[in-house]
Amino acid sequence: MKASRTKTPGFWSRRIGEPIRQQLTQGVSPEKIALTLALASGLSVFPVLGTTTVLCFLTGILLKLNQPIVQGVNFLGSLAFLPAAVAFIKVGDVLTHSAFSSLDFPAMISMATHHPADFLSKFGTTAVHGILGWAVAMAVWLPLVYASALPFLRRLPLGR
């Protein structure tokens, strides 16, 4: 009779396969997935261009959320980024009793790329207004998405 030996995982399994498996299965409780959907959808429309992927990534790491879901939702949310950013800026303008901000996006992108200091001085207030509008919207959005997703997710067989 042969003695059974436990096979030691190989290099690729330890270094590639296992980290991928952990990412795919991390945070798969209904509550974690609902939190992931709420936060990733909210962060995906944060009104500062070029920040959403990093914000989503860091939030996923800090809260041990499922990164593939976080980044998938972030990708889908990018479709709503521009209209949401405009709405958030307008809300921020109203909340601060300011004149409506100038929103010449091609000029903004060009200036941000070629003259960052000038961009900040000219459009910094616009960004602050957008962040303010976003924060107000998130106070409603995050609990709404979480509460809406949770009952549905609790009915799914999520690896229990």
Image (tube, rainbow, N blue to C red):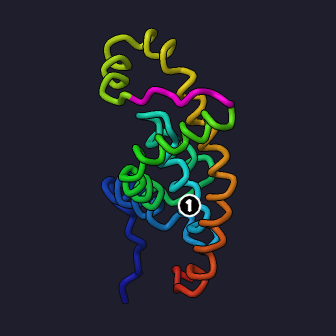
What SS does tag 1 mark?
A: helix
Q: Residue at x 42, y 47 (%)?
A: 83
Residue 90 x, y percent position in the rendering: 55, 39
Give 88 or 155, whichever is nearer the viewer: 88
Residue 49 x, y percent position in the rendering: 42, 34
Determine which residue is flagged by label 1: 36
Give 152 or 102, whichever is nearer the viewer: 102
Relative to 87, does residue 152 appear above or below in the rendering?
below
Q: Is residue 33 left or right of residue 116?
A: right
Give 155 or 139, whichever is nearer the viewer: 139
Q: Residues within 10 Å of mark 1 (few under 14, many from 20)?
A: many
Q: Residue at x 52, y 42 (%)?
A: 46
Magenta region, residue range: 97-103
The amino acid type of the residue labelled 1 equals Thr
Residue 15 x, y percent position in the rendering: 37, 51
Q: Residue at x 58, y 27 (%)?
A: 99
